[in-house]
Image (spheres, helix red, strand yellow):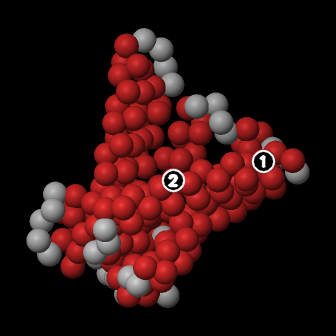
């Protein structure tokens, strides 16, 4: 399986924009095949610098002082973090009978992390300072997070064809599993 080329990355990010605007045919900008699904995880590699910079700006990058094993631990935790929700989403989708459409949801969800990750990074770096601009950036990050949750809800409804309650379930599962996984992996890393 080859890595996605620049054209696939740009098409996917543009597809996220079109899908967010509700443009007809936007889903066709994504490669929703099995291979395209696995290539969409490359968004995690592309957005990793934003996550690292965000950690540094917030003083949460203690792993940087720990040597090579701490860096490897960070990358492994990051990779596991990226895999948890897709696995949970597949289980949920199978239970509600929409497993055949799960890639329509997960592929754009992986790619939307790229622009949102860098936007959040910008807000976190600016918000790490002091003063009214930092306060504004912190407030904007909350609104951006709510916007991301709304997109996930809308995409679950539209792309999976599930009820509003089930769409909320997918959004909550992402937040719950991601947060629990992050906290669990951080506590394991801190204990070692």
Q: Residue at x 31, y 46 (%)?
A: 147
Q: Percent x, y for residue 185?
A: 73, 54
Q: Nearer the viewer, residue 151 or 5?
A: 151
Apparent side of residue 134 relative to residue 157 in the rendered image (left or right): right
- Is residue 94 placed above or below 80 in the rendered structure? below
Apparent side of residue 39 relative to residue 5 in the rendered image (left or right): right
Residue 8 shows up from this direction: no
| Location of mark 1 (residue) | 187
Q: Residue at x 54, y 41 (%)?
A: 53
Q: CA distance from mark 2 to mark 1?
A: 18 Å
Q: Secondary structure at mark 1?
A: helix
Q: Are marks 2 and 1 in contact (CB under 8 Å)?
A: no
Q: Which mark is residue 46?
A: none
Q: Residue furthest left?
A: 24
Q: Percent x, y for residue 181?
A: 66, 57
Residue 92 shows up from this direction: yes
Mark 2 / mark 1, whichever is N-terminal: 2
- Is residue 15 placed above or below 144 in the rendered structure? below
> Which-is-in-front pick, marks 2 and 1?
2
Q: Percent x, y for residue 46?
A: 46, 60
| Location of mark 2 (residue) | 175
Q: Secondary structure at mark 2?
A: helix
Q: Residue at x 35, y 22 (%)?
A: 136
Looking at the rendered structure, the number of numbered marks drawn on it comes to 2
Q: Nearer the viewer, residue 125 or 146?
A: 146
Q: Residue at x 53, y 66 (%)?
A: 85
């Amino acid at each position: 399986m080859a890595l996605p080329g620049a054209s696939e990355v740009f098409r996917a990010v543009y597809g996220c924009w079109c899908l967010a605007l509700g443009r007809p045919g936007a889903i066709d900008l994504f490669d929703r095949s099995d291979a395209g699904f696995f290539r969409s995880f490359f968004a995690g590699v592309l957005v990793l610098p934003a996550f690292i910079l965000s950690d540094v700006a917030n003083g949460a990058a203690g792993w940087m002082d720990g040597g090579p094993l701490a860096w490897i631990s960070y990358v492994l935790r990051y990779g596991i973090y990226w895999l948890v929700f897709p696995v949970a989403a597949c289980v949920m989708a199978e239970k509600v009978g929409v497993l055949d459409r799960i890639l329509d949801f997960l592929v754009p969800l992986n790619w939307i992390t790229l622009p949102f990750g860098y936007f959040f990074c910008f807000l976190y770096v600016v918000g790490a300072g002091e003063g009214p601009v930092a306060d504004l950036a912190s407030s904007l990050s909350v609104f951006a997070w709510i916007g991301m949750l709304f997109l996930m809800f809308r995409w679950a409804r539209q792309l999976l064809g599930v009820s509003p309650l089930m769409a909320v379930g997918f959004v909550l599962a992402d937040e719950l599993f991601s947060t629990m996984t992050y906290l669990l992996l951080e506590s394991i890393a801190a204990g070692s």
